[in-house]
């Protein structure tokens, strides 16, 4: 049985930053509720750069020292105490989350600013409070090291995300939010049953302690299966995706960008923690083939369903179903120790890069789709003709971010899929390569369905219903550029992602 890297269970200097990463947005949430009104927006916007600074500081320390950052709250060690731990993957996700929170927060100002002369509006207050709450919960997910506290974190995330879906109060968005809540609650029950079985069998829920104690048994397999099924429902992996398209497609543009880019990554992150960190020896036998098959089905069926959509936001939402599938191809490719360290490392890095590049790309595309909808008053794909001339910056941003979805160079999506392809070929698992190539072709098809009418000329002059400030278009463009720039940072990112990995994924 292989555990995590050495020294991973000792507290480190700078560990207090892990507490600050969680408590800063949580404190901002409380202040926003206390002062209310337009102050909620100001508090949230003031919190954004500070939170980004903390995330960058954590990443810098981990990169400089080459070891995870660990902190025990109150000095109490597990299993009695609560520990926080940030490895390379955690640091990358913390920084990605902070950058996207800054971008989405600035983009959302125009939609959720309290109008002059009005002390407070419900939608504005709720949005900024939930933004901070989701940020705090995401950081808790990325830093938690025991499965019960991770359960608390992902529940807080769920109850922050569900209201975002129905902020406008329309019947269809309320229905979508209730469907989302139902799937999330069922997933929570399954996850909680699983951790109860684990605790009964091993007397701890600390991930590092479990990695040294856990062994193949019927109880272990049942517990892991329950936890995985619950998290898959929250991650909307095919065929548990039914809640995602109406929820993401009907939410306000900033909420859709937040949900699709970050919220669905949290359950995926916990599945990685479960199988790679807590149970690395069981992954090949118990989970890798099943998770890989579900990921492949998501890539193919999600792409086909995206091709059939008539609304832009629904097409993007089904594209999220497909792109999430690539993340789960990492499990059969990186979770088989006997197939070579280089291949495992390439698959691990590819999966992590896919999570990051997809986050930036989807934030950019959903935000851009929101601007298009505001200008036209609808998002029907067949009626987008001429919008490229009215909104050239947004059109360029959508096309640029789409490079990652299609896996074209030099985007982050290309790097991620290329690394997964390398792992697939070198381990003689060619069927995953076929799935990825087919998914790229299908992605090109549904992206072409969008860009073709946008880039074509209108039959008659297009009259915008609403002017869009150039700064909002610029934010969309910056997010799109980030999704591509990730593709040119492979060396430093790969080294950072290697810090604190399970031993079976560490190259020599």
Image (cartoon, grey):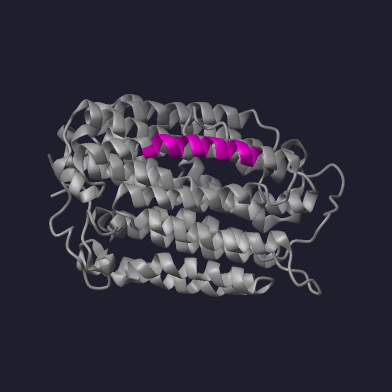
Nearer the observer, 211 or 474 = 211
Nearer the observer, 354 or 230 = 230
321 over 467 or under it: above or below = above
Residue 313 appears at what percent x and percent y?
Answer: 65, 42
| Residue at point 72%, 38% (across, down) | 172
Q: Quadrant of residue 6?
A: bottom left
| Residue at point 49%, 51% (across, down) | 157
Q: Is residue 323 visible?
A: no
Q: Is residue 271 magenta?
A: no
| Residue at point 57%, 58% (across, down) | 130
Residue segment shown in magenta: 176-192
Give the side of residue 121 with respect to residue 158, left or right: right
Counting every numbered tag in the picture gives 0
Q: Is residue 110 visible?
A: yes
Nearer the observer, 181 or 290 = 181
Residue 106 appears at what percent x and percent y?
Answer: 60, 66
Nearer the observer, 487 or 72 = 72
Give the side of residue 217 with respect to residue 32, left or right: left
Give the side of residue 338 with respect to residue 120, left or right: left
Picture quarter with the N terminus = top left
Give the side of residue 299 with respect to residue 434, left or right: right
Residue 117 appears at what percent x and percent y?
Answer: 81, 74
Q: Main secondary structure of the magenta part?
A: helix
Q: Is residue 189 magenta?
A: yes
| Residue at point 37%, 46% (across, down) | 269
Residue 162 appears at what percent x and percent y?
Answer: 58, 47
């Amino acid at each position: 049985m292989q555990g995590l890297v050495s020294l991973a269970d000792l507290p480190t200097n700078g560990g207090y930053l892990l507490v600050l990463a969680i408590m800063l947005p949580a404190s901002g949430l409380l202040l926003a509720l206390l002062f209310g009104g337009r102050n909620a927006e100001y508090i949230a916007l003031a919190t954004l750069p500070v939170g980004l600074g903390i995330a960058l500081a954590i990443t810098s320390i981990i990169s400089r020292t080459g070891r995870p950052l660990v902190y025990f709250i109150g000095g109490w060690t597990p299993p009695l105490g609560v520990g926080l731990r940030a490895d390379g993957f955690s640091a990358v996700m913390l920084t990605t989350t902070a950058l996207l929170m800054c971008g989405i927060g600035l983009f959302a100002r125009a939609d959720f600013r309290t109008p002059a002369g009005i002390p407070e509006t419900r939608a504005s207050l709720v949005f900024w409070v939930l933004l901070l709450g989701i940020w705090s919960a995401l950081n808790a997910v990325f830093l938690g090291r025991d499965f019960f506290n991770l359960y608390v974190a992902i529940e807080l995330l769920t109850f922050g995300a569900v209201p975002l879906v129905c902020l406008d109060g329309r019947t269809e968005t309320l229905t979508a939010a209730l469907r989302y809540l139902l799937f999330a609650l069922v997933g929570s029950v399954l996850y909680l049953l699983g951790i109860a079985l684990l605790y009964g069998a091993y007397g701890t829920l600390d991930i590092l302690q479990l990695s040294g104690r856990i062994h193949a048994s019927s109880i272990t397999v049942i517990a892991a299966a329950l936890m995985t099924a619950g998290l898959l429902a929250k991650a909307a992996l095919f065929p548990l995706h039914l809640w995602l398209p109406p929820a993401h497609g009907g939410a306000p543009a900033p909420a859709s960008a937040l949900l699709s880019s970050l919220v669905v990554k949290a359950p995926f992150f916990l599945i990685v923690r479960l199988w790679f960190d807590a149970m690395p020896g069981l992954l090949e036998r118990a989970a890798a083939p099943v998770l890989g098959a579900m990921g492949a089905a998501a890539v193919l069926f999600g792409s086909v369903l995206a091709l059939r959509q008539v609304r832009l936001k629904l097409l993007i939402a089904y594209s999220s179903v497909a792109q999430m599938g690539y993340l789960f191809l990492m499990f059969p490719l990186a979770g088989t120790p006997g197939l070579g360290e280089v291949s495992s490392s390439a698959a691990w890095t590819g999966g992590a890069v896919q999570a990051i590049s997809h986050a930036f790309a989807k934030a950019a595309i959903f935000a851009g789709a929101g601007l298009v909808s505001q200008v036209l008053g609808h998002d029907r794909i067949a009626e987008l003709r001429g919008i490229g001339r009215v909104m050239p910056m947004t059109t360029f941003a959508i096309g640029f971010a789409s490079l990652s979805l299609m896996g074209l160079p030099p985007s982050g999506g290309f790097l991620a899929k290329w690394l997964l392809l390398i792992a697939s070929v070198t381990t003689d698992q060619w069927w995953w390569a076929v799935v990825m190539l087919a998914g790229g072709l299908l992605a090109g098809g549904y992206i072409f369905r969008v860009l073709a009418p946008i880039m074509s000329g209108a039959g008659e002059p297009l009259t915008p219903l609403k002017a869009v400030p150039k700064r909002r278009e610029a934010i969309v463009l910056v997010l799109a550029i980030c999704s591509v720039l990730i593709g040119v940072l492979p060396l430093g990112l790969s080294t950072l992602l290697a810090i604190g990995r399970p031993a079976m994924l560490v190259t020599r």
